Amino acid sequence: MVVAYLLLALAIVSEVVGTLALKMSDGFTKVIPTIFVVVGYLSAFASLGLGLSKGLSMGVAYGIWAGAGTALVAIMGIFLFKENLNVWGFLGIALIIVGVVLLEMGSSHG
């Protein structure tokens, strides 16, 4: 199961890299960021699929992948792109994290 979670972590990092590169690609007009978008998303879906084949529950894996990716992209947007996030945004990120933790705690894997 450790391998499955490592694959899930790779899927999260790859998705975050792909999403950040999506912003940097300027509508796919910049080649290098566009390559990172394609490689990031392909790696994310491949890693997620492999993690599922190693025993991760689909609901839990997707919840963690989507929730962690969303929270990380929002946080990285603050630092890399100087995007603003008000108190409601931070509360939303906190709720995503709490939701992911609860989803994991409620899963039925051994």
Image (spheres, helix red, strand yellow):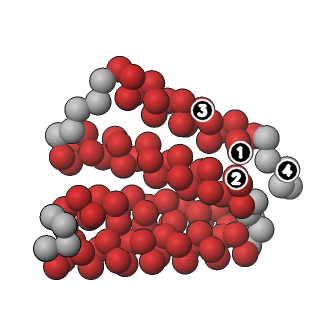
| Circle 2: residue type | Val
The quarter holding residue 20 reads bottom left
Residue situated in front as seen by the camera: 56 or 110: 56
Q: Name the residue located 62 percent from the left edge and 57 percent from the top edge.
A: 62
SS type, badge 3: helix
The part of the image, by quadrant, that contains residue 30 is: bottom left
C-alpha gap between disc 2 and disc 3: 13 Å
The quarter of the displayed image where residue 9 is located: bottom right
Residue assigned mark 2: 60
Mark 2 or 1 closer to N-term?
2
Residue at x-position 54% and y-position 36%: 96
User: Crowdedness of circle 3 by 10 Å Cα count: few (<14), some, many (20+)?
Assistant: few
Residue designated by label 1: 104
Q: Which residue is mark 3?
A: 98
Q: Secondary structure at mark 4?
A: loop
Q: Is residue 85 left or right of residue 68?
A: left
Earlier-in-chain disc, 1 versus 3:
3
* Circles 3 and 4 in contact, beta carbons < 8 Å: no
**Residue 71: horizontal and vertical position, in percent?**
44, 43
Q: Are marks 2 and 1 in contact (CB under 8 Å)?
A: yes
Mark 1 residue type:
Glu
In terms of secondary structure, where does tag 2 sit?
Answer: helix
